[in-house]
Image: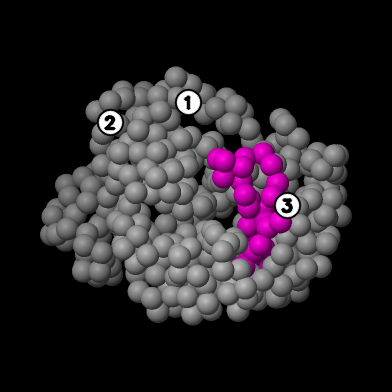
Amino acid sequence: MYLFNPENDLALANFTANYTPPASATRMTEELAILPIWYAGMDRRTLGRNNKETVVIAEGELNHSFLASIKKVLPLHASLIPFSDIALYPHLKIVPWGWNPTLRKRLVSYGANEEVLPSPEELICLRHYSSRKHAIGILGELKTEEAGVCGESHFFTDTEELYNWLESSPGNKVLKMPLSGSGKGLIWILGGITEKQRDWCRRVVREQGGVVAEPVLSKVQDFAMEFYLHEGKASFTGYSLFSTAASGAYAGNELLSDARIEEKLGRFASIELLHRLRYSMEEKLSHRFPLYTGYAGVDMMVCEISCGYCIQPCVEINMRMNMGLVARFFHERYMHPGGEGKFVVDYFKKPESALSFNEKMQRESPLKVENGKILSGYLSLTPVTKTTSYVAYVSVF
């Protein structure tokens, strides 16, 4: 049973069983609830083949009419069930976007079999693994091993030491909560730190034990290396080439083969360096997370420097499913080899604007499918109605 819970990072940072996510996260959860049908079963052991049946735990309206409308692309049979029916599937493994105490308590309250859920002790371990402190450590190791990498990241447990570093270091900086993700928990220091930002620092140190501080680099391209860990043994799953908003929030992925992504990144760095980083990251993830089974996405950046380009090889590590993997699996399962496009998760603020956009794209870029593989066109991956705000879609060129 697959479950989309994009508020996971916030809930894991809060780490209480009674956390209430913001309204925007709740709405995203409800409106994109069907998203797992596009990546269900695509872990490293089942890559390239469809499950006969996928069970998705869905919040809000169970939109079976949407499933019927995409049968020419989605051949697998998907069943949508509400939380209240979880007890009817006691032996099925539950595969959420990510695990946290709030989700565990909710599943238990609806009758889920506790034997298929992580224990409280395992969740404590996962929270420790999810801290940005691990990215700081791996970045430091890679900088001593590779000449073509860059980046600087510090963890301050004392606010005065943090303020001194900010004053003594030139340029703009970014401060991060140790536990957060997807562009959340960041503040940008443009010039001097403000009193409001000092309050933020004191609160984060009090609640999470410290603040991550980094100089702002001249970014050219975001990308990631995706890995799957089985009991701590990491293996490379694929690349992710993505874009972010100015705030750092995720904006979308390019739908490309790994070979094509390497070709694009090869304009800035050697393929040999990328491969060395890949193999080194497999070893470092295996060493640091010996008890973890699941996906880990390592965000990276191509940065411009005075003498050319370099790679920041460990911006952060996401110990969960992520949108880059959704894009990766979608490209491999539903697109013709060599096909290109983009995968986007968009937000529409005005009423009915999402529906208008969806109808316009369907007219102007009709979907073309051959033998179950998309050749070109637009496809919404989630239902779109008059009240929809969040839409996940692909556009294939």
Query: Of the residues shown, which amino acid type is indicated by label 2?
Result: Lys
Question: Whole-percent x and y of residue 358?
Answer: 77, 60
Numbered disc 3: secondary structure = loop
Q: Nearer the viewer, mark 1 or mark 2?
A: 2
Mark 1 and mark 3 lie on one chain; the one further toward the N terminus is 3
Count neighbours of disc 3 (C-alpha within 10 A) and say few if under 14, some if 14 to 19, many if 20 or more.
Answer: few
Res 52 label: 3
Query: Of the residues shown, which amino acid type is indicated by label 1?
Result: Phe
* Residue at x 25% of width, y 57% of height: 211
Residue 89 location, quadrant: bottom right
Count neighbours of disc 1 (C-alpha within 10 A) and say few if under 14, some if 14 to 19, many if 20 or more.
Answer: some
Res 143 label: 2
Q: Is residue 51 magenta?
A: yes
Q: Which residue is mark 1?
A: 268
Question: Whole-percent x and y of residue 365?
Answer: 82, 48
In this orientation, does residue 13 appear?
no
